[in-house]
Image: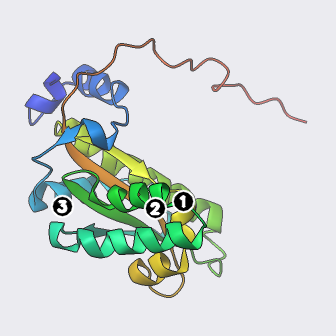
């Protein structure tokens, strides 16, 4: 773990180093334990520090307990069958419901009727909150990955997780990583930071 994961008050350099080291970890590289309820609450508190114009909080987090995984597997199977997948792919889709020691759904509610906070700003909040949530888990020493795709638009899954007007963004798998970070060169930032050229 980095210094930022080991101390309550990391130095700015250590905190930045931890942030720059974050990456998604696939469920096959996760084992128990996952975060406790208290740690998940802390991660949600970090999510609340994301930009949030109007304090709308256009997102929420839905936990899926271990006992609920079979019910989720049935929904994943229904999606796979409705999509015309093969029996082998249906079985693979079912198994994905058991990914990660801890599993949460990320749900968004975008209100297009708020003139002062247009939909794109609300989506920025949803994405920023999710990023903060996953960064917080990383700082705690956990690995996480969000999995989405077409199944998050399947009516049975949407009905099961969403209230009226909500969208199912994806599922975040969380656990203790079993592999070390793979060394890699820093991502290229040049070209993404540009001076304004008025037109």
Residue lying at 42% horizontally and 68% vertically, measured from the top left: 76
Relative to 63, does residue 91 appear above or below in the rendering?
A: above
Secondary structure at badge 3 equals helix
| Residue, disc 3 | 41
Quadrant in the picture for residue 14: top left
Q: Which residue is painted at 44% across and 85% down in the image?
A: 163
Q: Residue at x 62, y 17 (%)?
A: 190
- Residue 55 screen position, x and y as percent: 43, 69
110 to 21, vertically: above or below: below
Point out the tag, 3 or 2, that comes first from the N-terminus. 3
Q: CA distance from mark 2 to mark 1?
A: 6 Å
Label 2 sits on residue? 90
Q: Which corner quadrant of the image does residue 7 belong to? A: top left
Image coordinates for residue 100, horizontal then vertical, percent: 24, 50
- Please tell me whether mark 2 sits on a helix, a strand or a loop: helix
User: CA gap, disc 1 to disc 3?
Assistant: 39 Å
**Is residue 197 toward the left or the right of residue 91 in the image?**
right
Up the image or down, 142 lies above or below 130; here it is above
Q: Is residue 197 visible?
A: yes
> Badge 1: few (under 14), some or many (20 or more) residues near its Cα, within 10 Å?
few
Q: Quadrant of the N terminus?
A: top left
Q: Are marks 2 and 1 in contact (CB under 8 Å)?
A: yes
Residue 26 in picture, x, y percent from top left: 34, 39
**Side of 120 where 143 appears, left or right:** left
Residue 195: which disc? none
| Image-based side of 117 in relation to 59, left or right | right
């Amino acid at each position: 773990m980095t210094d930022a994961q080991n101390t309550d008050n990391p130095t700015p350099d250590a905190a930045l180093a931890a942030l720059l080291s974050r990456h998604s970890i696939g469920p096959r590289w996760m084992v128990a334990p996952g975060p406790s309820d208290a740690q998940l609450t802390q991660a949600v508190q970090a999510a609340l520090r994301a930009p949030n114009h109007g304090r709308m909080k256009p997102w929420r987090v839905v936990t899926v307990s271990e006992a609920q995984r079979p019910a989720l597997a049935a929904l994943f199977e229904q999606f796979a069958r409705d999509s015309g997948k093969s029996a082998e792919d249906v079985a693979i889709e079912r198994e994905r419901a058991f990914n990660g020691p801890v599993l949460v759904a990320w749900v968004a509610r975008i209100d297009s009727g708020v003139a002062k906070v247009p939909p794109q700003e609300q989506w920025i909040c949803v994405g920023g909150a999710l990023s903060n949530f996953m960064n917080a888990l990383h700082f705690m020493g956990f690995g996480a990955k969000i999995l989405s795709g077409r199944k998050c638009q399947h009516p049975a899954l949407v009905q099961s997780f969403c209230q009226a007007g909500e969208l199912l963004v994806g599922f975040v798998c969380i656990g203790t990583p079993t592999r070390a970070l793979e060394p890699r060169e820093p991502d290229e930032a040049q070209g993404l930071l540009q001076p304004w050229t008025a037109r």
